[in-house]
Image (spheres, coloured by chain):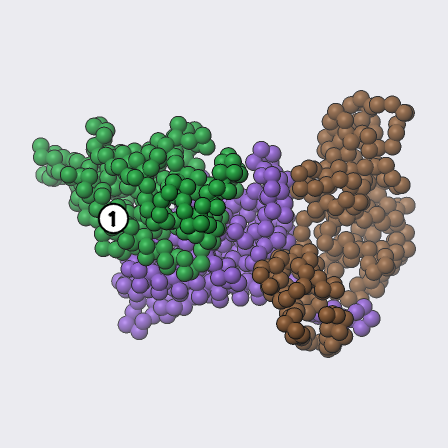
Amino acid sequence: MNLHILRNQHLYVAVFVVQAKFELDQLTVHAEKKQLVAPGELLAEGPYFAGENTYRDGSKIYSARVGLADVIGNKLIVVPIKGAYIPRIDDIVIGRVTDIGMSGWQVDICAPYPAMLPQSETPMQHGREMGRRDLGHLFGVGDLVLAQVIAFDRTRDPLLTTKGRGLGKVTSGRVARISPAKIPRIIGKQGSMITMLKNETLTDIVPGQNGIVLAIGKNPDQERIAVEALYMIEREAHTSGLTDRVRAMILEKMKGK
Amino acid sequence: MGGQKKTAQLIDSNGLRVDGRRIDELRPIKLEVGVLDKADGSAYIEHGKNKILAAVYGPREAHPKHIALADRAVVRCRYHMAPFSTDERKSPAPSRRELELSKVIRESLEPSIMSEYFPRATIDIFIEVLQADAGTRCAGITSAALALADAGIPMKELVAGCAAGKIEGKVVLDLSDIEDKQGEADLPVALMARSNVVSLLQMDGSLTPDEFNQAFEMATDACRKIYEMQREALKTKYHIVRDVEEKNEIVEAKA
Amino acid sequence: MSATRQLSPVAKLEQKTVVDLILKGKRIDDRGANDYRPTTITLGIIDKASGSAQVHLGKTKVVAGVKVEKGTPFPDTPDDGILTVNSEFVPLASPTFESGPPDENSIELARVVDRGIRESKAIDLKKLCIESGKKVFMVFVDIYVLDHDGNLIDAAAMAALGALVNAKMHDFDVKNGELRLKDAIIPLPLQNYPVSITTTKIDSTTVIDPCLEEEQVMTCRLTVTTDKNDNICAMQKGGLGVFTPDEIKQIVSTSIGKARDIRAKILASVT
């Protein structure tokens, strides 16, 4: 059963949303693509897969969160509007060092779980083991670090590494705290939004999957404008023509800076 | 000072109650989602004269660590009444009633929360009653469910609460404070409308089994109506008309 | 704050045994779905209390004591005596009980038992009035859990009722605003006998009077308290599960019948 057929039969009407319900061989998708759904709303009936943020009860698939419903192949998912950051392996994150232990650092990555950066996961320093005082020289309490998640599962807190290009202590720039669900919008389709931001504000934008975004520029004004642009994107993430409006806002503010 | 004068009649000769409602009529309800800045999720409800704020923090790190559960999140709930919320000032210290209600409210919401998603974390629900006029635990549940959804916490479905009762021998819906104080029975109920199951059920007073059935039907029907209001409140907050593929985007966004 | 409890220390194997049996229509102690465990009610075990009762419900043991003292009435009920129900889950009763102020389970139990007595008007509070607006008798019901093997609410309610039925006070009258205690000993002015019946849901089966192992695997419970006229005077759902409307109606109707049996038993132990 090919769902491509379903998609092409959706009606694209200018201002109004038309609820299209297709019944083919007892397969029924009740939610249309990008429809706002609440927990407990019926998405589909039949041999579909219950993807992210949905659940199956008998032959029916329901939404588990507030978000936009979508169909990918024969899998129903809900893209959430809001939610906590749950670490995934390979995620790039920006965190703050909160404690120094015997063999590493505890890092707050704004998740329900504190992360650990073991000394063994930092680039070799002087080719020898570091004591606690040395650890403090590398990253002190309060320092920001750009790291990557290398391990996380239900039984243990996330493990980080700074062995990787560009990873390590953050020494300059400003930080914006964005809802993790909006990070894809900050990046944009094929990086369109983030490329525009970098070009127009002349700053380097480093988005952490955990919602923390770095803006590193040559002067504080550029960084401030970049951060304002980031919050604007977060506020208006669901609108269209956003890239152009953000660009316009930046250009206005960049005048004379 | 303090205490109310006894009202002569709770139901008049036209079958109308003190506030003009019919026997089976709900008090007016207003719901608003996402009203607080710092909380992960929040909702405000006005149900009759009740004014209640619900906030959710979580999932977040468990503090202290030893309360954490290995396979799911700990759900914590605090129901609390502001000292100025009632006719006579209520002491800010948690009363036995508030402790009991914190428990039954948690037990009405937790069945719907998919807490297995967040082992070793906590989900904290705070319900503050700013003004009370009977039915606060039900209104608290209605707003807390919205706050949980607003926080993006995965749930099987929304939970809605409403009470029914008996005054002057008649089974009525949604008691107001004066009806609760002078009436013969109070039956708070919380319902998960999609799967049609009851997650809160309490009763005090005196009801025959038939009266109980009547009151229970009334309360559960009202819960279904309130569930529709909850959905509306969520859609109002996050209203997005379908986003067509990038080129010809025509969108109506409500901030 | 009310918080999700730590999972019980009952081994997974024992939990599985209970559930497997339930699915086959049996119970771990071989009872029928609607059977109470062997129950003994002994009255008058504490001489210094106005009234007392000890209940053994299976291995659950609860003692309740009643004390009658003088006090001032509430301003909005100047002619009514005062009823107070308290409960203590003392640490010796279970490895899970800690010392300290009553926790939410203890408070819930006290309030549910209180509702049963109060809403059924078991005590004619007007007969406890000494001087309107100034002096009344206060009835304290204190419930002491001694051994927790499940279904504390029903055992506590039985013990409370037993203690009230057992309680004695001096007959009295009031002359010139002064309380005069007479020699004659009279029972408390009781006019109703509330009984609570707790039903537990395990998977989708309901069983009455859960023992501790059953409580630890249950999804939820429903306590229904009825009076001598088969009127429902209190209800309380507890636990993290949910009930369908049909289950609730069925539990209510079964509970009314069971309550009659228990009531007869309590009243028989008076003689």
Residue placed at 62% from the left, 62% from the top?
A: A61
Which image quarter: residue A169? top right
The front one of B25 and C234 is: C234
The front one of C70 and C225 is: C225
Q: Is residue B180 left or right of residue B49?
A: left
Q: Colour of chain C?
A: green
Q: Quadrant of the N terminus of chain A?
A: bottom right
**Could you say where residue A247 lies in the image, as x and y percent from the top left?**
85, 61
**Could you say where residue C156 lies in the image, as x and y percent from the top left?**
32, 39
Q: Does residue B201 appear in the picture of this structure?
A: yes
What's the residue type where badge 1 is placed?
A: Asp
**Could you say where residue B167 lies in the image, as x and y percent from the top left?**
31, 62
Residue placed at 89% from the left, 41% from the top?
A: A165
**Could you say where residue C70 lies in the image, as x and y percent from the top left?**
22, 35
Question: In the structure shown, which secondary structural element does the residue marked by tag 1 occupy?
Answer: helix
- The correct choice, above or below, for A109 with respect to A245 in the image is above
Q: Which residue is the site of mark 1?
A: C261
The front one of B155 and A99 is: B155
Q: Is residue B178 left or right of residue B141?
A: left
Q: Colour of chain B?
A: purple
Chain (brown): A
Q: Does residue C84 appear in the picture of this structure?
A: no
Residue placed at 74% from the left, 46% from the top?
A: A88
Q: Is residue C84 left or right of residue A76?
A: left
Q: Is residue C153 left or right of residue A243?
A: left
